[in-house]
Amino acid sequence: MDRSLLLEALADRVLVFDGAMGTQIQAADLGTADFILPVESEAPAVREAASRLGGAVLEGCNELLCLTRPEVIGQIHDRYLEAGADLIETNTFGTTSVVLAEYQIPELVYEFAHAAGSIARQACDRYSTPQRPRFMVGALGPGTKLISLGQVTWQELEDSYSLAFRALLETGADALLLETLQDLLMVKAGIVAANRAMAETERRVPLFVQVTMEQTGTMLLGSDIAAALNMVECFPEVQAFGLNCATGPVEMLPHVRFLGENSTRPISVQPNAGLPVMEGGQAVYKLTPEALAEAHERFVTEHGVAIVGGCCGTTPAHIEAVSATLAGRPHGEGAHWRKVRGLFPGFDFTMRTDEQARALTLVGCSSLYMFQPYKQDSSFLIVGEKTNANGSKAFREMLAAENWDGLVELARELEGEGSHLLDVCAAYVGRDEVRDMRELLSRFNRHITVPIMIDSTEIDVVEASLQMLAGKPIINSINFEDGESRTEKVLALCRKYGAGVVALTIDEDGMAKSCQKKVSIAERILNRTRAAGLPDHDVFLDCLTFTLGSGDEEFREAGVETIRAIEELRLRHPLVNFTLGISNISFGLKPAARQIVNSAFLHYCLEAGLTSAIVHFSKIQPENQIDPEIWRIASDLVFDRRRFEAA
């Protein structure tokens, strides 16, 4: 990242955002003529659109004012700067093709964003001093369509957000902001778009993300704050995370408290001026400037909030009160800010050390709805295996019939049985795997609560799947069977989209059989994952096993070699996770015997340090439910203990 005066200021003191733009626009003396595209614009695209629309009034398109009344927008910025704001948001809340299409001008994203960025940049420059610089933040809102509901595609969002961000970067944005977001898949698309824009402009600036928590206690689609934080912390470029809009500070308090206890990033909070009250058919916000300042002081002192400001209903008077109370205040010595400042000097949030990784409290994966910790209190991380075309006849038949509702019900059954995660594979000869995964995962994303493990050998399938899943999924898998090229590509996708990964102990010579070989390949894998920026806890080593059911002398120690490898690697790398397809150990045996052998093998793998297993959990029995003699026989098979009776 380029040197950032903004991050240097944030490391030193509390910063103050501005307040509502819409409230100030409504108070301005504007007429219908101000909402007509100017035919005399210097931008050819604007002139063409103006000619096509023939003087149509685009009332409600506040972003248009950056072209027709730039002085009005500039004066609003000035009032917030005079009130003491450190950070000014551009007037680009609806500057995406999705929103502008409602006014028949989706092609004007770049022109609107460029004009808004120029106005905000000039305002910040007017008020900046060496002692107190002011910062332009290029801000984009959620639009009017949700990707998780299928109302808009990933590519449309990425392209539009990227284009707007590019214009804002070109006009001098000190940071980018995704605000008022209601859908975690949209958050992810926005982050990818921001990274793309920064790469295209060769300008790396901080990225801030703010989600909106409704009065229900979740985001609009039902996401809890833990799922949101877990996903966002996959992305080191997100330099601050927080909340804005929907409610006032009172309703935000539980979420702010949670972030203070769990976030490793500076926290940003911009409440509305309380909950709106309807008076005369209009929404009125009644929280006073003094009350907002008092709430923010509590957020800062008790929960480590670092960036404060206002959203709907707040005015320059609100920001003046907040600034008078908090502007320039050093960060406190609370637990949250000590963690941020001490573990991540210079605001480098890439997890590289054991100490940093241990500071995380949300170690796990997530879906659209919930966070799933890797470490389970009274169990292991159970990965349901029946949503896999390679291992489930029922799944294959429903996939062939394109019975999508039936496949959703199958996944729900696995949830009901206790699966914490679902392994999903749609690789089926003669079918389009990319299409099938898109169809399937778009439904699983909406209707399945637990996170997803994407199981595919094809890079295009993996990327398409990642674009369908909110939260933080896991990719299954990488190995070195064909060298390191594919592994590098998958790890790049993990980094781009935010995902964990399963790594198999396979190299150019095939599946490792001995403990020594498994450990050697695992070490090589960890060198690659660490170089790619993945923290150890997001790597699931799969030491694999061969079946004990073949009767082949070569594989009689297959189970014990796998157990030894898990044990050795666990000692060497305590933060790494371990997974295993348990049923592989018993291929070829009769169903009743398989159930016993699988149960015993899982038991001993867990003792060795296995943290996760791909397993049909309802068919696993604990030791105390199996006859001791039968358990002994299964254990002898797993450990290749040979007992011979004298004749």
Image (cartoon, grey):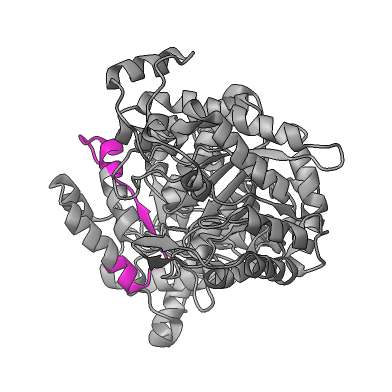
Q: Residue furthest left?
A: 401
| Whole-percent x, y for residue 509 in the image | 53, 36
Q: Is residue 423 magenta?
A: yes
Q: Nearer the viewer, residue 99 or 488?
A: 99
| Quadrant where the image shows the C terminus | bottom left
Q: Nearer the viewer, residue 44 or 537?
A: 44
The quadrant where residue 269 appears: bottom right
Does residue 479 appear in this view? Answer: no
In magenta, the rendered stretch is: 413-438
Number of numbered tags placed on the structure image: 0
Q: Residue furthest right?
A: 131
* Image-based side of 283 in relation to 579, left or right: left
Image point (50%, 43%), residue name: 28
| Whole-percent x, y for residue 372 in the image | 49, 65
| Whole-percent x, y for residue 293 in the image | 68, 65
* Image-based side of 227 in relation to 338, left or right: left
| Whole-percent x, y for residue 55 in the image | 31, 23
Does residue 600 appear in this view? Answer: yes
Vertical comparison of 481 with 470: above or below: above
Q: Is residue 277 magenta?
A: no
The quadrant where residue 362 appears: bottom right
* Image-based side of 229 in relation to 574, left or right: left
Vertical comparison of 647 with 37: above or below: below
Q: Nearer the viewer, residue 432 or 238?
A: 238
Vertical comparison of 458 with 417: above or below: above
Image point (47%, 59%), residue name: 366
Vertical comparison of 217 with 542: above or below: below
| Quadrant where the image shows the N terminus | top right
